């Protein structure tokens, strides 16, 4: 698998995320999944779901980014795999219907897959389906913000489990560009807080909920 500089940055990202992708992203040469259309159609996968996988692969396929702070780094690179229409259980016990496809292989042996959900969400899937961000752009924005915050913060504090649940966020504003669902970012007067709840919800293990507090940030670090 050959790696190349990532020259074309997909639209829909902030300037910070675009700079992050240009500076740190490379692209692997991967096949176009359009070649699987006939076989997928014969196996009963709707054409609209194949269209989604093809569009994702052409837009994001092969992009390699630095690892995320959690989820053992996230996908090694983005790659669309065979769409799956099996119903999934949500964290609240309800059943979610629709089609999923894999967003990329894991970097390590984590007990879940990284998936694109029925509404385009980026999330993790094991016994349960937990969307982390409303779309793949939100995941990339979160990676870029984590890299930015870690560089500029004077202190980084990690809290887990109940301590993460007890954080006071009423004086913080939610960071919109990460399009957070299970995972969110919060901006205060001199700090940023990243809350990672996806693994706790997916595996039913509240102790694995994590908050990273990046403190001592100036105006540039905050924004």
Image: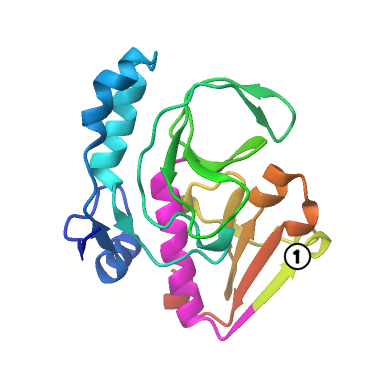
Occupied quadrant, residue 101: top left
- State the quadrant of the C terminus: bottom left
198 or 27, which is in the foreground? 27
Magenta span includes 157: no
Residue 70, above or below 103: below
Picture layout, residue 51 above or below residue 133: above
- The magenta-colored residue range is 132-156
Residue 133 appearing in the image: no
Who's the residue at 56% across and 62% down the image? 72
Across and down, in percent, residue 77 comes to 37, 55
To which quarter of the image does residue 14 belong?
Answer: bottom left
Q: In terms of secondary structure, where does tag 1 sit?
A: strand
Which scheme is used to colour this image of the protein? rainbow
Residue 196 position in % (x across, y down) = 63, 56
Q: Quadrant of residue 39?
A: top left
Residue appearing at x 67%, y 36% in the figure = 127
Q: For the point 71% across and 24% down, which residue is it?
A: 94
Image coords of residue 74 (percent x, y): 49, 57
Q: State the predominant SS element of the stretch in magenta.
A: helix
Q: Front-most of 37 and 156?
A: 37
User: In front: 101, or 131?
Assistant: 101
Q: Where 144 sits versus 134, above or below?
A: below
Mark 1 sits on what residue?
160
């Amino acid at each position: 698998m050959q790696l190349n500089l990532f020259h074309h940055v997909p639209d829909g990202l902030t300037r910070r995320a675009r700079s992050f992708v240009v500076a740190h992203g490379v692209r692997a040469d991967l096949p176009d999944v359009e070649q699987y259309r006939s076989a997928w159609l014969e196996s009963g996968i709707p054409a609209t779901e194949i269209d989604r996988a093809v569009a994702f692969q052409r837009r994001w396929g092969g992009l390699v980014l630095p690892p995320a702070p959690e989820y053992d780094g996230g996908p090694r690179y983005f790659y669309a795999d065979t769409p799956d229409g099996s119903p999934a259980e949500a964290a609240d016990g309800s059943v979610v219907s629709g089609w999923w496809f894999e967003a990329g292989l894991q970097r390590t042996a984590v007990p879940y897959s990284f998936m694109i959900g029925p509404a385009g969400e980026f999330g993790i899937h094991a016994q349960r389906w937990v969307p982390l961000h409303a779309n793949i752009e939100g995941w990339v924005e979160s990676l870029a913000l984590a890299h930015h915050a870690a560089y500029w913060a004077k202190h980084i504090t990690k809290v887990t489990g109940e301590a993460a649940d007890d954080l006071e966020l009423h004086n913080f504003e939610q960071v919109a560009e990460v399009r957070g669902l299970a995972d969110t970012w919060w901006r205060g007067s001199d700090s940023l807080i990243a809350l990672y709840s996806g693994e706790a919800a997916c595996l039913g293990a509240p102790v694995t909920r994590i908050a990273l507090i990046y403190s001592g940030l100036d105006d540039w670090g905050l924004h």
